[in-house]
Amino acid sequence: MLDKHSPIGIIDSGIGGYSVARRLQNHLPHEDFLYLGDGANTPYGNHSAQEILHMTRRLLQFMAQRRVKALVVACNTISCVAEQLIGALECPILNVLQSGAQAVARLQPDRVGVISTCFTAQSGCYPERILRLSPDTQAISRGCPDLADLIERYIDQPGGAGRIDQAIRDNLAGLEDLDCFLLACTHYPLAQENFQRLYPHIQWLDPAEELAGAVETFLTEHSLLNPSPELGRLEIYTTGSAPDYAHKAETAGLLQIASVRHLAI
């Protein structure tokens, strides 16, 4: 049985899920969150589907041990294989793919660029889901090799903005005439200032707001909102560098950080 006092789990291949965690904290300030980023294996978009499933199941085992009341998959690459994870946990699994498609459907653009990891682009999951919800919208996918990894490594580093800017220009070459893009990798909103500065005429859609709303709706409908009047706590775990994750969490504007720890799984 799910307990309203239990934390909400968030998983990602790295720090990209910080963009989702930030929105979740804004929507649900009294909830406790448990974040796990697989920094040792990021980015997942450079792995095969079977490798992604294997790595993700290790993350889910940790979340099952901590008895989370809901799991948020804050990784578009994992979300593309999420149907194969149904039943892996007792709690519901909410993923960013549906939220991204819904964000596009609300806007109903004629054309939308979908920038993501190469795995997400090659899977075709976003054009398929967008077509279901917004049949008149043409989704144009573009896989961006190494952009998520560059953001992971350089978003908070001196001189990092220049590296990220160049990678964005290279990856968007030929698509500049589009006026709407979906940021279909949770790392990308961490560099939203870069995207907006380089292409101010483009509307950039971040699925995180839609996903945070979906989590809030689920908890409300199932009477699982934490009744505590106190602000919730955020525990962060990573298979990578805990000091690096701690610094980037502060840069991302995360709140009520109780601890940042290395996890060997």
Image (cartoon, helix red, strand yellow):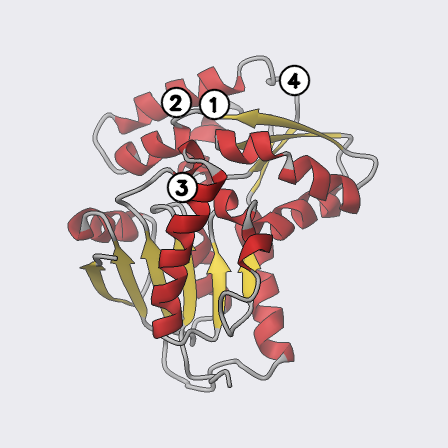
Q: What is the distance, in whole Å, between disc 3 and disc 1 at their CAs? A: 15 Å
Give the amino acid at mark 4.
Asp
Q: In the rendered image, which quarter contains the C terminus?
A: bottom left
Quadrant for residue 33, please give it. Answer: bottom left
* SS under mark 1: helix
Q: What is the distance, in whole Å, between disc 1 and disc 4 at their CAs? A: 13 Å
Q: Please tell me which of labels 2 and 1 falls first in the chain.
A: 2
* SS under mark 4: loop
Give the amino acid at mark 2.
Asp
Q: Which residue is mark 2?
A: 165
Residue that appears at 40% across and 71% down: 64
Q: Please tell me which of labels 1 and 4 falls first in the chain.
A: 4
Instruction: Residue 55 in the image: state x and y as whole percent.
Output: 38, 49
Of 158 and 13, nearer the camera is 13
Q: Which residue is mark 4?
A: 177
Q: Which residue is mark 3?
A: 190
Q: What is the distance, in whole Å, between disc 2 and disc 3 at their CAs? A: 13 Å
Q: Please tell me which of labels 3 and 1 falls first in the chain.
A: 3
Q: Which residue is mark 1?
A: 198
Instruction: Residue 213 in the image: state x and y as whole percent.
Output: 59, 62
Q: Please tell me which of labels 2 and 3 falls first in the chain.
A: 2
